[in-house]
Amino acid sequence: MESLEKNQQKSAQTEVSLEFLLLHLPISELGLSARPYNCLESARIRTVGDILSHTEQDLLSIRWLGDESLREIKHILMDYNLSLKRYGSNASIILPIGKRGRKRNGTKKNESRDLDILEGLALREYGIIWDMSYQGARNYILKSGQHETWKEARKRKLEEEKIKRNPEFYSKQAKRVIAGQVVNIMYRRAIEEGNLPWQKAIEYFYSRKTRPQTTTIKRLVKLFGAYYTALERGDKLSLEELSEISGIKGFPHVGRILSKVGLEPMYGAREIKFSLSKEKAEAIGRVFDLDMSIPDIAHFLDVPSHVVSQRFNRIGPRPRRKFIYQAGFGTERLNYRLLSQICEAADLGFTKEETAELFDTTLNIVNYANENRPSLEKVLIDSLRTIFPERKISKPYLQGN
């Protein structure tokens, strides 16, 4: 007998729980056609329980919801063994309170409202659902002690809406977070294992606000690996050698990287200053307005690029010069110094293939330079005459002194 009673109690509890779940089933799951669904949504009727808390007259009073839509709703409810009339008069089942017929019970706890709070809606939405002002909804949440619960639910709801609006951004953000976690694990492991190259590489990489494309983690590990290996062997590597081994362009940049993580160059700080002759200083002043890039000017004057850049900065702002020709999404570029080298190689009898290999460029660039040489070399020769007015220049390259 006892077991029979227990089974009956369990079956009754299961029945109630199923009814409870059914009452909170979203109307989007009912398979309604567009008109009745949109009408119910506009009236803030979102669950089966919300439908059942309204009479037929209430539903017909919704704008654009007519007899045909009402018949469709009733037909679907019948599939679930539900009807508006039955549940409208059955007091043994606790229904979610709809928009109409609500009684304001002060701060008395209300199960339906408490479930609504977990959805994290805005206060104005609660006011519409609960048939009260948004201030009344706020007071209920505060006085029922559920303000913190609502805040957490609201925060979660807003995050979900943001992700829906811009899923790509948040997927990238999630990838960044995961990447950061992986790097932290790698950094802790590097410290535990005493792996100084990895430790220093991660320290430098994440201490920079801007990260040049050439200064990757992989190249930094190569740099610090070569540095510490040389120390262990008692060898010395110059900044140029470290730059070549790591693939990080520019030995001054390598020196700055070492300095950033508290390491000294193996040959000490570079103390030699470049000595600029009077003639070259005057030449830099003459070519300020020349349509030639700073690296090109530095190449023809045989001085470091930073020297030309510093001199130009003293004169004033100078627009950045473009390349003569770009192809392959900007990866193939022709500048004046490469044009000069290609022209000289052609005059010396090198083939196009040999020229491309010699100057580490593409056959496309070599062909373009040779095909357009008549017009391009005239501009280059005029520029070289501006740089070296004392020389007799008839070729697009420098011949001796």
Image: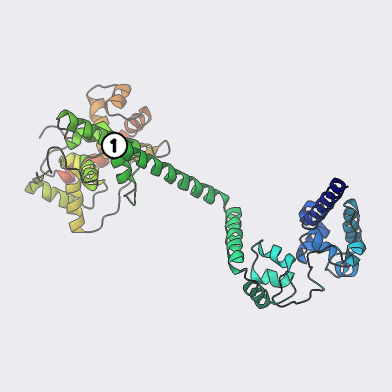
Q: Quadrant of residue 92?
A: bottom right
Give percent across and percent down for residue 53.
83, 66
Q: Quadrant of residue 350?
A: top left
Residue that appears at 33% across and 22% down = 353
Name the residue furthest front.
1
- Name the foreground residue: 89 vs 371: 89
- What residue did someone put label 1 on? 194
Give percent across and percent down for residue 281.
11, 49
Give percent across and percent down for residue 232.
18, 30
Count of numbered tags: 1
Residue kind at label 1, given as amino acid type: Gly
Residue that appears at 26% across and 36% down = 223
Give percent across and percent down for residue 337.
24, 37
Residue 334 visible in the current orientation:
no
- Name the foreground residue: 249 vs 5: 5
Residue that appears at 64% across and 76% down = 139
Helix, strand or loop at label 1? It is: loop
Residue that appears at 79% across and 57% down = 20
**Where 268 falls versus 244 (above or below)?**
below
Residue 96 visible in the current orientation:
yes
Quadrant into which the C terminus falls: top left
In-image side of 233 versus 101 (left or right): left
